[in-house]
Image: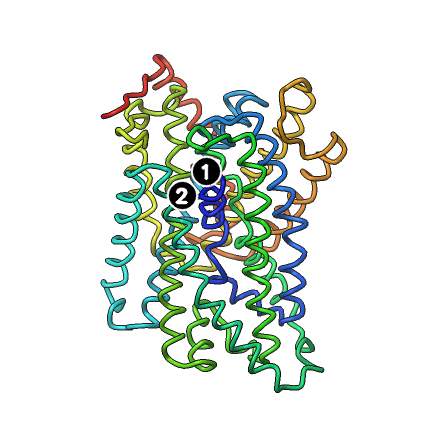
Amino acid sequence: MRMLPLAAATYFMVSGGPYGIEDILTAGYFNGLIILLALPLLWSLPTALMIGELASALPEEGGFYIWVRRAMGPFWGYQEAWLSLAASIFDMAIYPTLFVLYLGTLAPTWTAGWHGLAWELVLIAACCVWNLLGAPAVGDGSMGLFVILLAPFVVLVGYAAIRGAHLHHAEMFTAPGTHAGITTAILVAMWNFMGWDNASTVAREVDRPQKSYPRAMLLSTAIVTVSYVIPLAAMAWARVPVEQFSTGSWAEVARSMAGEWLGIAIVVGGTVTSLGMFNALTMSYARLPMALAEDGLLPRVLARRNGRGVPWVAVLACAVAWALALRFSFERLISIDLILYGASLILEFVALVVLRLREPSLERPFRAGNLAVTCVIAAVPSALIFYAMYASRHERMAGMPALALGGLIAAVGPIGYLISKSVWSRSRPKVAVGD
Protein backbone atom coordinates (compact mmCIF):
# COMPACT_ATOMS: atom_id res chain seq x y z
CA MET A 1 0.00 0.00 0.00
CA ARG A 2 1.08 3.52 -0.79
CA MET A 3 0.73 6.41 1.67
CA LEU A 4 -2.68 7.71 0.53
CA PRO A 5 -4.38 4.28 0.50
CA LEU A 6 -2.83 3.67 3.94
CA ALA A 7 -4.31 6.97 5.16
CA ALA A 8 -7.69 6.05 3.65
CA ALA A 9 -7.64 2.61 5.29
CA THR A 10 -6.61 4.23 8.60
CA TYR A 11 -9.53 6.65 8.24
CA PHE A 12 -11.91 3.69 8.11
CA MET A 13 -10.16 1.90 10.96
CA VAL A 14 -10.77 4.96 13.12
CA SER A 15 -13.74 6.87 11.80
CA GLY A 16 -15.64 6.16 8.64
CA GLY A 17 -17.26 9.60 8.63
CA PRO A 18 -19.80 11.36 10.87
CA TYR A 19 -21.90 8.21 11.23
CA GLY A 20 -22.00 7.12 14.86
CA ILE A 21 -21.25 10.53 16.40
CA GLU A 22 -24.91 11.51 16.84
CA ASP A 23 -24.96 10.57 20.53
CA ILE A 24 -22.26 13.17 21.18
CA LEU A 25 -25.06 15.75 21.02
CA THR A 26 -26.44 14.49 24.33
CA ALA A 27 -23.96 17.07 25.64
CA GLY A 28 -25.41 19.86 23.47
CA TYR A 29 -23.80 21.53 20.45
CA PHE A 30 -21.32 23.66 22.37
CA ASN A 31 -20.02 20.88 24.62
CA GLY A 32 -20.11 18.39 21.76
CA LEU A 33 -17.95 20.56 19.52
CA ILE A 34 -15.52 21.31 22.35
CA ILE A 35 -15.15 17.57 22.93
CA LEU A 36 -14.59 16.94 19.21
CA LEU A 37 -11.91 19.62 19.10
CA ALA A 38 -10.19 18.62 22.35
CA LEU A 39 -10.00 14.85 21.88
CA PRO A 40 -7.84 14.98 18.73
CA LEU A 41 -5.22 16.86 20.78
CA LEU A 42 -5.53 14.78 23.96
CA TRP A 43 -6.38 11.37 22.50
CA SER A 44 -5.72 11.05 18.77
CA LEU A 45 -2.55 13.08 18.25
CA PRO A 46 -0.54 11.39 21.05
CA THR A 47 -1.59 8.00 19.70
CA ALA A 48 -0.73 8.98 16.13
CA LEU A 49 2.70 10.22 17.24
CA MET A 50 3.35 6.99 19.14
CA ILE A 51 2.38 4.91 16.12
CA GLY A 52 4.41 7.09 13.76
CA GLU A 53 7.55 6.47 15.84
CA LEU A 54 7.13 2.75 16.51
CA ALA A 55 5.79 1.80 13.08
CA SER A 56 8.68 3.59 11.36
CA ALA A 57 11.25 2.08 13.75
CA LEU A 58 9.79 -1.45 13.74
CA PRO A 59 7.81 -1.90 10.49
CA GLU A 60 6.87 -5.51 11.15
CA GLU A 61 3.68 -7.38 10.34
CA GLY A 62 1.83 -7.74 13.61
CA GLY A 63 2.49 -4.09 14.49
CA PHE A 64 1.72 -3.27 18.11
CA TYR A 65 2.10 -6.93 19.15
CA ILE A 66 5.70 -6.81 17.90
CA TRP A 67 6.37 -3.51 19.71
CA VAL A 68 5.16 -4.74 23.10
CA ARG A 69 6.90 -8.10 22.70
CA ARG A 70 10.21 -6.41 21.89
CA ALA A 71 9.90 -3.93 24.76
CA MET A 72 8.64 -6.24 27.52
CA GLY A 73 8.97 -9.82 26.35
CA PRO A 74 6.70 -12.53 24.87
CA PHE A 75 4.32 -12.68 27.86
CA TRP A 76 3.29 -9.04 27.56
CA GLY A 77 3.30 -9.27 23.78
CA TYR A 78 0.76 -12.07 24.06
CA GLN A 79 -1.37 -10.00 26.46
CA GLU A 80 -1.33 -7.13 23.96
CA ALA A 81 -2.53 -9.42 21.18
CA TRP A 82 -5.12 -11.06 23.44
CA LEU A 83 -6.62 -7.76 24.57
CA SER A 84 -6.74 -6.47 21.00
CA LEU A 85 -8.35 -9.61 19.61
CA ALA A 86 -10.83 -9.73 22.50
CA ALA A 87 -11.70 -6.06 21.88
CA SER A 88 -12.18 -6.86 18.20
CA ILE A 89 -14.96 -9.32 19.07
CA PHE A 90 -17.03 -6.43 20.41
CA ASP A 91 -15.66 -3.71 18.11
CA MET A 92 -16.38 -5.61 14.92
CA ALA A 93 -19.95 -6.37 15.99
CA ILE A 94 -20.69 -2.62 15.95
CA TYR A 95 -20.31 -2.12 12.18
CA PRO A 96 -22.78 -4.76 10.97
CA THR A 97 -25.18 -3.34 13.60
CA LEU A 98 -24.79 0.17 12.15
CA PHE A 99 -25.11 -1.22 8.62
CA VAL A 100 -28.49 -2.77 9.42
CA LEU A 101 -29.57 0.32 11.38
CA TYR A 102 -29.04 2.60 8.38
CA LEU A 103 -30.44 0.11 5.90
CA GLY A 104 -33.56 -0.19 8.06
CA THR A 105 -34.20 3.54 7.83
CA LEU A 106 -34.34 3.16 4.03
CA ALA A 107 -36.47 -0.01 3.91
CA PRO A 108 -37.67 -1.30 7.31
CA THR A 109 -38.98 -4.55 5.85
CA TRP A 110 -35.51 -5.43 4.57
CA THR A 111 -34.12 -5.65 8.10
CA ALA A 112 -37.18 -6.92 10.00
CA GLY A 113 -36.81 -10.14 12.01
CA TRP A 114 -34.18 -12.54 10.77
CA HIS A 115 -33.41 -10.35 7.75
CA GLY A 116 -31.30 -8.04 9.90
CA LEU A 117 -29.02 -10.87 11.00
CA ALA A 118 -28.82 -12.11 7.41
CA TRP A 119 -27.60 -8.71 6.20
CA GLU A 120 -24.99 -8.62 8.97
CA LEU A 121 -23.66 -12.01 7.91
CA VAL A 122 -23.60 -10.91 4.25
CA LEU A 123 -21.49 -7.90 5.23
CA ILE A 124 -19.00 -10.10 7.08
CA ALA A 125 -18.75 -12.53 4.16
CA ALA A 126 -18.29 -9.74 1.60
CA CYS A 127 -15.43 -8.21 3.58
CA CYS A 128 -13.73 -11.57 3.92
CA VAL A 129 -13.78 -12.03 0.14
CA TRP A 130 -12.49 -8.47 -0.39
CA ASN A 131 -9.64 -9.03 2.07
CA LEU A 132 -8.56 -12.18 0.29
CA LEU A 133 -7.64 -9.95 -2.67
CA GLY A 134 -4.82 -8.42 -0.59
CA ALA A 135 -3.97 -5.29 1.40
CA PRO A 136 -3.50 -3.05 -1.68
CA ALA A 137 -7.07 -3.90 -2.78
CA VAL A 138 -8.37 -2.90 0.65
CA GLY A 139 -6.39 0.35 0.66
CA ASP A 140 -7.37 1.37 -2.87
CA GLY A 141 -10.99 0.45 -2.18
CA SER A 142 -10.95 2.58 0.95
CA MET A 143 -10.12 5.64 -1.14
CA GLY A 144 -13.20 5.11 -3.30
CA LEU A 145 -15.46 4.43 -0.33
CA PHE A 146 -14.14 7.58 1.36
CA VAL A 147 -15.43 9.75 -1.50
CA ILE A 148 -18.80 7.96 -1.63
CA LEU A 149 -19.56 8.26 2.08
CA LEU A 150 -18.56 11.93 2.47
CA ALA A 151 -20.22 13.27 -0.70
CA PRO A 152 -23.74 13.43 0.86
CA PHE A 153 -22.36 15.30 3.88
CA VAL A 154 -20.76 17.91 1.63
CA VAL A 155 -24.21 18.52 0.16
CA LEU A 156 -25.86 18.50 3.61
CA VAL A 157 -23.37 21.06 4.94
CA GLY A 158 -24.13 23.25 1.93
CA TYR A 159 -27.88 23.12 2.61
CA ALA A 160 -27.26 23.84 6.30
CA ALA A 161 -25.13 26.87 5.44
CA ILE A 162 -27.87 28.29 3.21
CA ARG A 163 -30.60 27.61 5.76
CA GLY A 164 -28.61 29.04 8.64
CA ALA A 165 -27.81 32.24 6.77
CA HIS A 166 -31.39 33.44 7.37
CA LEU A 167 -31.58 32.51 11.08
CA HIS A 168 -30.74 34.24 14.34
CA HIS A 169 -27.60 32.69 15.89
CA ALA A 170 -27.27 34.40 19.25
CA GLU A 171 -28.41 31.26 21.08
CA MET A 172 -27.16 28.53 18.76
CA PHE A 173 -24.82 27.08 21.42
CA THR A 174 -26.78 27.85 24.59
CA ALA A 175 -28.51 24.49 25.15
CA PRO A 176 -26.20 22.76 27.67
CA GLY A 177 -26.12 19.03 28.16
CA THR A 178 -26.49 17.18 31.45
CA HIS A 179 -23.49 15.75 33.30
CA ALA A 180 -24.56 12.25 32.23
CA GLY A 181 -24.91 13.51 28.66
CA ILE A 182 -21.39 14.96 28.68
CA THR A 183 -19.98 11.69 29.99
CA THR A 184 -21.79 9.75 27.27
CA ALA A 185 -20.54 12.23 24.67
CA ILE A 186 -16.92 11.80 25.81
CA LEU A 187 -17.16 8.00 25.68
CA VAL A 188 -18.78 8.04 22.23
CA ALA A 189 -16.19 10.54 20.98
CA MET A 190 -13.33 8.43 22.34
CA TRP A 191 -14.71 5.43 20.48
CA ASN A 192 -15.02 7.51 17.31
CA PHE A 193 -11.39 8.65 17.64
CA MET A 194 -9.78 5.30 18.47
CA GLY A 195 -8.14 2.61 16.38
CA TRP A 196 -5.07 4.36 14.94
CA ASP A 197 -2.77 1.52 15.97
CA ASN A 198 -4.72 -0.98 13.86
CA ALA A 199 -2.95 0.34 10.77
CA SER A 200 0.39 -0.91 12.12
CA THR A 201 -0.27 -4.64 11.69
CA VAL A 202 0.21 -4.54 7.90
CA ALA A 203 3.58 -2.75 7.94
CA ARG A 204 5.31 -5.27 5.68
CA GLU A 205 2.69 -4.59 3.03
CA VAL A 206 3.19 -0.79 3.08
CA ASP A 207 5.45 1.02 0.63
CA ARG A 208 8.29 2.82 2.47
CA PRO A 209 6.70 2.42 5.93
CA GLN A 210 9.34 4.64 7.58
CA LYS A 211 7.93 7.64 5.72
CA SER A 212 4.38 6.49 4.99
CA TYR A 213 3.24 5.82 8.58
CA PRO A 214 4.00 9.21 10.17
CA ARG A 215 2.48 11.04 7.20
CA ALA A 216 -0.59 8.79 7.05
CA MET A 217 -1.22 9.11 10.79
CA LEU A 218 -1.07 12.91 10.81
CA LEU A 219 -3.10 13.25 7.60
CA SER A 220 -5.85 10.91 8.75
CA THR A 221 -6.00 12.62 12.16
CA ALA A 222 -6.70 15.94 10.47
CA ILE A 223 -9.29 14.47 8.09
CA VAL A 224 -11.14 12.60 10.85
CA THR A 225 -11.37 15.75 12.95
CA VAL A 226 -12.64 17.88 10.07
CA SER A 227 -15.20 15.28 9.00
CA TYR A 228 -16.67 15.30 12.53
CA VAL A 229 -16.54 18.99 13.40
CA ILE A 230 -17.84 20.58 10.19
CA PRO A 231 -21.11 18.59 9.91
CA LEU A 232 -21.98 19.17 13.60
CA ALA A 233 -21.08 22.86 13.38
CA ALA A 234 -23.27 23.11 10.27
CA MET A 235 -26.20 21.56 12.15
CA ALA A 236 -25.74 24.10 14.93
CA TRP A 237 -25.61 26.90 12.35
CA ALA A 238 -28.86 25.64 10.80
CA ARG A 239 -30.43 25.46 14.29
CA VAL A 240 -31.35 21.78 14.04
CA PRO A 241 -32.62 20.80 17.53
CA VAL A 242 -30.28 18.42 19.33
CA GLU A 243 -33.33 16.35 20.27
CA GLN A 244 -33.54 15.22 16.64
CA PHE A 245 -30.24 13.38 16.94
CA SER A 246 -29.79 9.79 18.05
CA THR A 247 -27.85 6.87 16.60
CA GLY A 248 -28.73 6.64 12.91
CA SER A 249 -30.65 9.92 12.64
CA TRP A 250 -28.53 11.69 10.00
CA ALA A 251 -30.89 10.46 7.29
CA GLU A 252 -33.95 12.03 8.92
CA VAL A 253 -32.13 15.34 9.36
CA ALA A 254 -31.12 15.27 5.69
CA ARG A 255 -34.70 14.54 4.60
CA SER A 256 -36.09 17.41 6.64
CA MET A 257 -33.49 19.82 5.28
CA ALA A 258 -33.16 18.90 1.59
CA GLY A 259 -35.65 16.19 0.71
CA GLU A 260 -36.01 12.44 0.41
CA TRP A 261 -33.20 12.14 -2.12
CA LEU A 262 -30.53 13.38 0.30
CA GLY A 263 -31.90 11.17 3.07
CA ILE A 264 -31.45 8.17 0.78
CA ALA A 265 -27.92 9.29 -0.08
CA ILE A 266 -27.05 9.55 3.63
CA VAL A 267 -28.42 6.05 4.21
CA VAL A 268 -26.35 4.68 1.35
CA GLY A 269 -23.33 6.46 2.84
CA GLY A 270 -24.08 4.89 6.23
CA THR A 271 -24.01 1.42 4.77
CA VAL A 272 -20.80 2.30 2.89
CA THR A 273 -19.05 3.47 6.06
CA SER A 274 -19.99 0.26 7.88
CA LEU A 275 -18.65 -1.76 4.97
CA GLY A 276 -15.46 0.28 4.77
CA MET A 277 -14.73 0.11 8.50
CA PHE A 278 -15.36 -3.62 8.77
CA ASN A 279 -13.29 -4.24 5.65
CA ALA A 280 -10.26 -2.20 6.79
CA LEU A 281 -10.34 -3.62 10.30
CA THR A 282 -10.57 -7.18 8.98
CA MET A 283 -7.27 -6.54 7.22
CA SER A 284 -5.75 -5.28 10.47
CA TYR A 285 -7.02 -7.77 13.03
CA ALA A 286 -6.39 -10.87 10.90
CA ARG A 287 -2.65 -10.19 11.00
CA LEU A 288 -2.56 -10.68 14.79
CA PRO A 289 -3.37 -14.42 14.95
CA MET A 290 -1.05 -14.85 11.97
CA ALA A 291 1.82 -13.18 13.87
CA LEU A 292 1.08 -15.26 16.96
CA ALA A 293 1.08 -18.42 14.87
CA GLU A 294 4.43 -17.46 13.34
CA ASP A 295 5.79 -17.11 16.89
CA GLY A 296 4.47 -20.54 17.84
CA LEU A 297 1.72 -19.24 20.13
CA LEU A 298 -1.27 -20.33 18.04
CA PRO A 299 -1.87 -23.24 15.63
CA ARG A 300 0.37 -23.02 12.60
CA VAL A 301 -2.60 -23.22 10.25
CA LEU A 302 -3.42 -19.58 11.12
CA ALA A 303 -0.17 -18.46 9.48
CA ARG A 304 -1.11 -19.85 6.08
CA ARG A 305 -1.32 -17.27 3.30
CA ASN A 306 -2.80 -17.29 -0.14
CA GLY A 307 -0.97 -16.24 -3.27
CA ARG A 308 -1.54 -12.56 -2.44
CA GLY A 309 0.09 -12.90 0.98
CA VAL A 310 -3.22 -12.77 2.88
CA PRO A 311 -3.52 -14.96 6.02
CA TRP A 312 -6.72 -16.50 4.73
CA VAL A 313 -7.28 -18.96 7.57
CA ALA A 314 -6.90 -16.16 10.14
CA VAL A 315 -9.36 -14.01 8.19
CA LEU A 316 -11.99 -16.76 8.24
CA ALA A 317 -11.38 -17.63 11.90
CA CYS A 318 -11.78 -13.99 12.95
CA ALA A 319 -14.95 -13.62 10.88
CA VAL A 320 -16.58 -16.54 12.67
CA ALA A 321 -15.69 -15.10 16.07
CA TRP A 322 -17.05 -11.66 15.13
CA ALA A 323 -20.32 -13.13 13.90
CA LEU A 324 -20.97 -14.56 17.38
CA ALA A 325 -21.12 -11.09 19.01
CA LEU A 326 -23.76 -9.52 16.76
CA ARG A 327 -26.61 -9.29 19.27
CA PHE A 328 -25.30 -6.76 21.82
CA SER A 329 -26.59 -3.17 21.91
CA PHE A 330 -24.53 -0.30 20.47
CA GLU A 331 -23.93 1.40 23.84
CA ARG A 332 -22.85 -1.80 25.56
CA LEU A 333 -20.51 -2.67 22.72
CA ILE A 334 -18.82 0.73 23.06
CA SER A 335 -18.31 0.28 26.83
CA ILE A 336 -16.59 -3.11 26.68
CA ASP A 337 -14.69 -2.13 23.54
CA LEU A 338 -13.22 0.93 25.26
CA ILE A 339 -12.20 -1.11 28.31
CA LEU A 340 -10.36 -3.81 26.37
CA TYR A 341 -8.92 -1.58 23.67
CA GLY A 342 -7.87 0.96 26.30
CA ALA A 343 -5.91 -1.65 28.23
CA SER A 344 -4.07 -2.72 25.07
CA LEU A 345 -3.31 0.89 24.14
CA ILE A 346 -1.78 1.53 27.58
CA LEU A 347 0.61 -1.37 26.94
CA GLU A 348 1.63 0.25 23.65
CA PHE A 349 2.43 3.54 25.36
CA VAL A 350 4.44 1.66 27.98
CA ALA A 351 6.34 -0.03 25.15
CA LEU A 352 7.07 3.39 23.61
CA VAL A 353 8.70 4.62 26.83
CA VAL A 354 10.46 1.32 27.61
CA LEU A 355 12.02 1.16 24.14
CA ARG A 356 13.30 4.71 24.56
CA LEU A 357 15.03 3.62 27.78
CA ARG A 358 16.24 0.16 26.71
CA GLU A 359 17.13 0.86 23.08
CA PRO A 360 18.10 4.53 22.79
CA SER A 361 20.21 3.71 19.73
CA LEU A 362 17.32 2.09 17.84
CA GLU A 363 17.00 3.82 14.48
CA ARG A 364 13.87 5.97 14.61
CA PRO A 365 13.16 7.69 11.26
CA PHE A 366 10.40 9.58 13.05
CA ARG A 367 10.55 10.61 16.72
CA ALA A 368 7.57 11.76 18.78
CA GLY A 369 9.81 14.08 20.84
CA ASN A 370 12.37 13.72 23.62
CA LEU A 371 11.88 11.35 26.56
CA ALA A 372 9.92 13.89 28.62
CA VAL A 373 7.55 14.58 25.72
CA THR A 374 7.17 10.85 25.18
CA CYS A 375 6.11 10.36 28.80
CA VAL A 376 3.49 13.12 28.46
CA ILE A 377 2.26 11.57 25.21
CA ALA A 378 1.79 8.29 27.06
CA ALA A 379 0.22 9.77 30.20
CA VAL A 380 -2.61 11.87 28.74
CA PRO A 381 -4.40 9.17 26.70
CA SER A 382 -3.87 6.69 29.55
CA ALA A 383 -5.66 9.07 31.92
CA LEU A 384 -8.57 9.27 29.48
CA ILE A 385 -8.71 5.49 29.32
CA PHE A 386 -8.96 5.22 33.10
CA TYR A 387 -11.72 7.84 33.02
CA ALA A 388 -13.61 5.80 30.41
CA MET A 389 -13.28 2.68 32.52
CA TYR A 390 -14.61 4.51 35.57
CA ALA A 391 -17.48 6.08 33.63
CA SER A 392 -18.52 2.66 32.29
CA ARG A 393 -18.72 1.10 35.73
CA HIS A 394 -22.56 0.97 35.69
CA GLU A 395 -22.91 -0.53 32.20
CA ARG A 396 -23.84 -4.20 32.32
CA MET A 397 -23.14 -7.03 29.90
CA ALA A 398 -23.79 -10.76 30.32
CA GLY A 399 -25.36 -10.10 33.71
CA MET A 400 -22.40 -8.25 35.22
CA PRO A 401 -20.79 -4.79 35.12
CA ALA A 402 -18.93 -4.18 31.85
CA LEU A 403 -15.77 -3.33 33.82
CA ALA A 404 -15.92 -6.68 35.64
CA LEU A 405 -16.49 -8.50 32.36
CA GLY A 406 -13.52 -6.69 30.86
CA GLY A 407 -11.40 -7.72 33.85
CA LEU A 408 -12.43 -11.37 33.45
CA ILE A 409 -11.60 -11.31 29.75
CA ALA A 410 -8.21 -9.74 30.46
CA ALA A 411 -7.53 -12.37 33.15
CA VAL A 412 -7.86 -15.11 30.55
CA GLY A 413 -4.79 -13.71 28.78
CA PRO A 414 -2.12 -15.12 31.15
CA ILE A 415 -3.88 -18.50 31.12
CA GLY A 416 -3.99 -18.43 27.32
CA TYR A 417 -0.28 -17.64 27.20
CA LEU A 418 0.62 -20.65 29.36
CA ILE A 419 -1.56 -22.93 27.26
CA SER A 420 -0.26 -21.54 23.98
CA LYS A 421 3.35 -21.80 25.08
CA SER A 422 2.99 -25.41 26.20
CA VAL A 423 0.91 -26.62 23.25
CA TRP A 424 2.11 -24.72 20.17
CA SER A 425 5.58 -23.32 20.89
CA ARG A 426 7.34 -26.68 20.64
CA SER A 427 7.93 -26.08 16.97
CA ARG A 428 7.80 -22.69 15.30
CA PRO A 429 5.48 -22.81 12.30
CA LYS A 430 6.63 -22.15 8.78
CA VAL A 431 4.44 -19.79 6.81
CA ALA A 432 2.96 -21.52 3.78
CA VAL A 433 2.68 -19.06 0.91
CA GLY A 434 0.21 -19.99 -1.81
CA ASP A 435 -1.88 -22.42 0.30
Q: Tell which tag, 1 or 2, sits nearer the viewer.
A: 1
Position above or below: 57 against 320: above
Position above or below: 12 against 285: below
Which residue is painted at 54% across and 36% down in the image? 213
The dot on residue 325 is: none
Asked if marks 1 and 2 touch (Cβ < 8 Å), the reply is yes
Q: Which residue is mark 1?
A: 2
Q: Nearer the viewer, residue 196 or 150?
A: 150
Q: Nearer the viewer, residue 420 or 376?
A: 376
Which residue is painted at 68% across and 24% down in the image? 356
Q: Nearer the viewer, residue 404 or 225?
A: 225
Q: Which residue is mark 2?
A: 139
Which residue is painted at 47% across and 41% down in the image? 6
Residue type (three-letter) at the residue carrying disc 2? Gly
Residue type (three-letter) at the residue carrying disc 1? Arg
Q: Quadrant of residue 360?
A: top right
From the image, which quarter does the C terminus lie in?
top left
